[in-house]
Amino acid sequence: MIAQFILSTLLAGILMYAWSEYARSPAIAVLAVFVAMAGLYFVWAPEHSTQLAELVGIGRGVDLILYIWVCLSLIVVLNLHLKLRMQMELITALARKIALADAQPTRAQMEQDGPASDFLLSGP
Amino acid sequence: MVSRSRVYVVIPAYNEGSIISRVVAEVKRAGYAVVVVDDGSSDATAEEARTADAVVISHPFNLGQGAALQTGIAYALAQPAEVIVTFDADGQHRVSDISHLAEALLQERADFALGSRFLGQAPNLPPLRWALLRAATVFTRLTTGLQVTDTHNGLRAMTRRGAAAIRLRQNRMAHASEWLSQIAASGLRYVEQPVTVEYTAYSIARGQTVGDAVLILLDLFARRLYR
């Protein structure tokens, strides 16, 4: 009974998180709500998870939930990986801007542009 | 005929301090404008390239060859470049091939001239490297539909219009396939031109391996999963 209350509290937390996340990414929020609701249901009716597992050819309900959990975590990892790649593209764009702003000219270019900036630097 | 000072040779370099000044000096001696993109090297690559009087653009940290090429192209496009050439820093390309590529652009009215070692020559090409390059070529032909003979050659020339159509997003080595898919998507004309790629102990050590090829395939696959 204690485990069921603890799990229910955690899953209720996920529901609240999904609610707050809805504006940012509706797809993730709906998925999280669905997973949390399914979790709550199976926490209070474990025998139904066993029936469902037997229906799809898996021995025990816990095994079914374990397999689903592994799949979901892989999806989450992939999603994080893609997010990291997108961030890398932003970082690249930023680094490129900085690099281009700091481009070191050749001696010939410096002679062309040089006197003006020297004058500014050595001015009164 | 394009004035050589309007031909910008972009050389991406990562820890090539021991060879970069020689490569830059050789390209400069032929009269071309040289842009070295120092990709966050931890050695003296940037200083060496500056000593040889190249324009040096330094990434604040290492981003990869694709990113370095894109930075160099962005710089050249902001300058009065008429032809932009990409050239490897490890000394395996021949400076004399640059003018052949630039000529090919004009004569064939193309926007891209791609160097091919398989139409040209590749002395001392190790057999395993040969097999890897052939496999990469078959793969790229299948995925882009371009009938090219050498998809992973760092020596290419393009017009301003061609360069503006390229936007490399594969920071690392997977950019070679990206070039071809973007050339195909742009609908611009491309030609292949025989070039010589010389394999030295140095360039072989710096080249790609079978393990890298697997990572490249993963990169290409991951890129298709978003946007």
Image (cartoon, coloured by chain):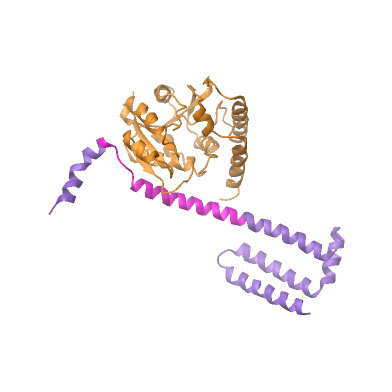
The answer to whether residue B159 shows anywhere in this view is: no
Compared with residue B79, is residue A123 higher up or lower down, i.e. above or below?
below
Of residues B56 and A69, the one nearer the viewer is B56
Considering depth in this image, is B217 or B23 the residue closer to the camera? Answer: B23
Q: Which residue is drawn at 85% across and 71% down?
A: A47
Q: Judging from the image, what is the letter of the chain drawn in orange?
A: B
Horizontal and vertical percent for residue A88? 50, 51
Look at the image and tell me in which quarter the C terminus of chain A lies: bottom left
Q: B57 left or right of B184?
A: left
Q: Residue drawn at (56%, 30%), measured in percent from left and top?
A: B146
A106 drawn magenta: yes
Would residue B91 appear left or right of B222 to someone viewing this image? Answer: left
Could you tell me what secondary structure mostly forms the magenta stretch?
Answer: helix
Q: Is residue B108 above or below residue B141?
A: above
Whole-percent x, y for residue B144 in the image: 58, 35
Magenta includes A58?
Answer: no
Rendering coords of residue B69 (x, y %): 44, 39
Residue B143 locus on image (x, y percent): 61, 36
Give the extent of the magenta segment: A79-107
Task: Tell me what hue chain A is rendered in.
Answer: purple
